[in-house]
């Protein structure tokens, strides 16, 4: 959610074109004006990047497409290999959709307690699901996917979204560049939520390269007592934590997030 202190820039959000194929429906999402903070923050224009308008319905389409394309370019992903990763969420939907569009088999490891809608959507794209123990959460799915790859050398291409630099680069070259262009360089603050941290890292780096004084804040949503098992901060270890040294880290609970993240068609934006 980028902000700009230049009110005039609000009316200068540039349109972007998206191409004609399903994969062209990834990226180049619009910025939507959010007006609900206008009273508290007069003169500050707030926008939300409409990532739900990506072809697969989430920001994760960008990373999945980039990791698959970079896997092809490096020679690690060949037509005979199966795309394998652990995911309980939108990345799985994105892998399944991109894999179907490009003709790759996709196998996803996810805990059994993933929602029925998610399972049905992934299956509808033709991807296979391997179930891991719900009690072990995301960690269990990661461990099982790694074991499957180790037990079957040469069978899989495993993008590994938590450690693959193509994840954040998708946002450096895509999301971040788009925000800079769409605000005509007027953006001064950027806030993103964290999963793998690819979105936050890629966009922050791009905006900071464009404007050294760019302010950045990361937030995560969860419920009180929400387990951090499977959290990318834990999984990738101390290196990830040091990345946040110069930004703010906001912890937001689900009730507050639901209040703030109202549908964009709300009268307050
Ligand atoms: C809808 C949505 N937004 C944001 C994120 C976080 O993205 P990232 O993994 O780039 O930090 C995710 C995934 O965790 C997501 O599903």
Image (spheres, rainbow, N blue to C red):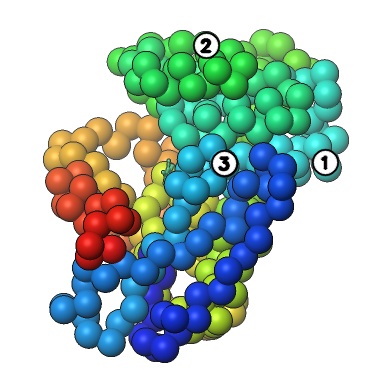
Residue in front for this viewpoint, 124 or 4:
124
Q: Earlier in the sequence, mark 3 or mark 2?
A: 3
Q: Where is mark 1, residue-wise?
A: 74
Quadrant showing the C terminus: bottom left
Density class for disc 3 (Cα within 10 Å; few <14, some 14-19, many ≥20) is many
Q: Quadrant of the N terminus?
A: bottom left
Check disc 1 and report its element: helix, strand or loop.
helix
Q: Is mark 3 within 8 Å of ligand 1?
A: no
Front position among marks 3 and 2:
3
Task: Please name the residue shown 61% across and 47% down the image.
Answer: 26
Residue drawn at x 71%, y 30% as measured from the top left? 101
Q: Which residue is mark 3?
A: 55
Q: CA distance from mark 2 to mark 1?
A: 27 Å
Mark whose residue sits in front, 2 or 1: 2
What residue lies at 52% left-to-right and 29% top-to-bottom? 92
Q: Give the residue drawn at x 52%, y 51%.
A: 198
Q: Position of residue 107 (x, y in %)?
A: 61, 18
């Amino acid at each position: 959610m980028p902000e700009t202190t230049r009110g005039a820039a609000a009316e200068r959000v540039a349109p972007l074109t998206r191409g004609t194929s399903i994969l062209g429906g990834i990226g180049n999402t619009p910025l939507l004006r959010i007006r609900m903070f206008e009273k508290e923050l007069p003169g500050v224009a707030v926008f939300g990047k409409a990532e739900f308008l990506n072809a697969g319905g989430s920001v994760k389409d960008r990373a999945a497409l980039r990791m698959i394309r970079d896997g092809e370019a490096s020679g690690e992903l060949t037509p005979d290999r199966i795309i394998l990763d652990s995911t309980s969420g939108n990345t799985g939907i994105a892998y399944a959709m991109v894999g179907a569009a490009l003709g790759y088999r996709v196998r996803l490891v996810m805990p059994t307690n993933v929602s029925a809608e998610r399972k049905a959507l992934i299956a509808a794209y033709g991807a296979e699901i391997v179930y891991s123990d719900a009690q072990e959460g995301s960690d269990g799915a990661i461990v099982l996917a790694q074991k499957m790859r180790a037990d079957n050398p040469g069978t899989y291409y495993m993008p590994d979204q938590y450690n693959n630099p193509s994840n954040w680069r998708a946002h450096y070259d895509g999301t971040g560049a788009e925000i800079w262009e769409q605000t005509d360089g007027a953006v001064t603050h950027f806030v993103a939520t964290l999963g793998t941290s690819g979105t936050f890292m890629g966009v922050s780096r791009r905006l900071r390269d464009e404007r050294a004084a760019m302010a950045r804040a990361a937030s995560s949503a969860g419920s009180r007592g929400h387990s951090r098992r499977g959290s990318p901060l834990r999984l990738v270890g101390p290196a990830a934590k040091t990345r946040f040294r110069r930004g703010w880290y906001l912890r937001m609970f689900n009730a507050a997030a639901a209040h703030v993240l109202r549908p964009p068609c709300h009268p307050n934006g």
